[in-house]
Image: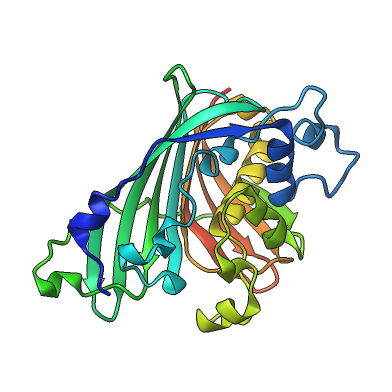
Amino acid sequence: MAIDVAKLKAWPHKPIEHRYTFRDSILYALGVGLGQDPLDRKQLRFLYEDGLQALPTMAVVLGSPGFWSKDPGTGIDWVKILHGEQHLVLHAPLPAEGTVIGLTRVTALVDKGADKGALMYSEKTLTDPSGKLLATATGVSFLRGDGGFSANGQPSDVAPPPRPATPDRAPDRVCELKTRPEAALIYRLSGDYNPVHADPDVAAKAKFPQPILHGLCSFGVTGHALLATLCDYDPARLKEIGTRFSSPVYPGETLRVEMWVDGANVQFRTRVVERDVVVLSHGTAVIVP
């Protein structure tokens, strides 16, 4: 079944009320790698219930519709989906536990050609029960098996402007963080159950030698690096973070986050040390004093 542009843009996403506890906040922090030094008191702010704080990047897993693209009605070849880009704006600090409401919508579909796939742009707003806006998360999914829809008379949207390129000079700051071998198996418990991250057979069908780490887990690890290096682990200082997912990460690899700092504005990229491969590129962040 080919994708139906009008149907996807009108997909009946309902507001999702998400109640979460301190255990969920701790599980997310463990999933993105905090706690490997259990004596690091700054990391314990996100791992120990006494005075617990939520990591800002946890907003991407709260109030989410789950792996809705797997619904046969979408017509999407879900096995071939890859997360292309993610951008997160924090309008207010996330509570360590509570209730939030997420509302997702598809905002654009871009046809790259029958042999090149398609891009699906989406937006999720996250509010508290009073309607206060907490976060806005926008993402791009690379539908590798669904290109060519415009040849059938369906309209293709114009792609938004590309993300800014990384500066052509040495980074100002660098942070290396090791991922756990079981990182994908922990991170999926925060809500993303795509089997390509757990099942070796599904990963093989998607042309990967083993299950890959969730793109949003690499995103969270990178957020941790920014928080540790530029924010002194104060989550209120990280206001915005966005990036392009340029290559998969395998659990257990070391991520090297390279940062270029210009006042509140930061550019970054994330590289796998063992393979010397850039896995997150065109990264930007906003950090306040």
Tell me: residue 268, above or below residue 44. below
Residue 159 shows in this picture: no
Q: Residue at x 26, y 73 (%)?
A: 147
Q: Residue at x 51, y 55 (%)?
A: 169
Placement of 51 over or under 241, stated as above or below: above
Near-viewer residue (207 or 3):
3
Residue 257: x percent and y percent? 62, 53
Q: Is the image coloured rainbow, by chain, by secondary structure, or in one colour?
A: rainbow
**Image position of 114 with respect to 53: above or below:** below
The image quarter containing residue 212 is bottom right
**Along the line of sight, the residue nearer the viewer: 152 or 159:** 152
x then y, percent, for residue 251: 70, 66
In the image, what residue occupies the spot 57% across and 47% down?
259
Quarter of the image containing the C terminus?
A: top right
Specify whether 23 is left or right of 279. Answer: right
| x then y, percent, for residue 11 | 29, 50
Judged from this view, the residue extending furthest toward the right is 39
Q: Residue at x 72, y 44 (%)?
A: 27
Task: Quadrant for residue 47, please give it.
Answer: top right
Looking at the image, residue 177 sits to the left or right of residue 279; the answer is right
Quick check: 76 above or below 124? below
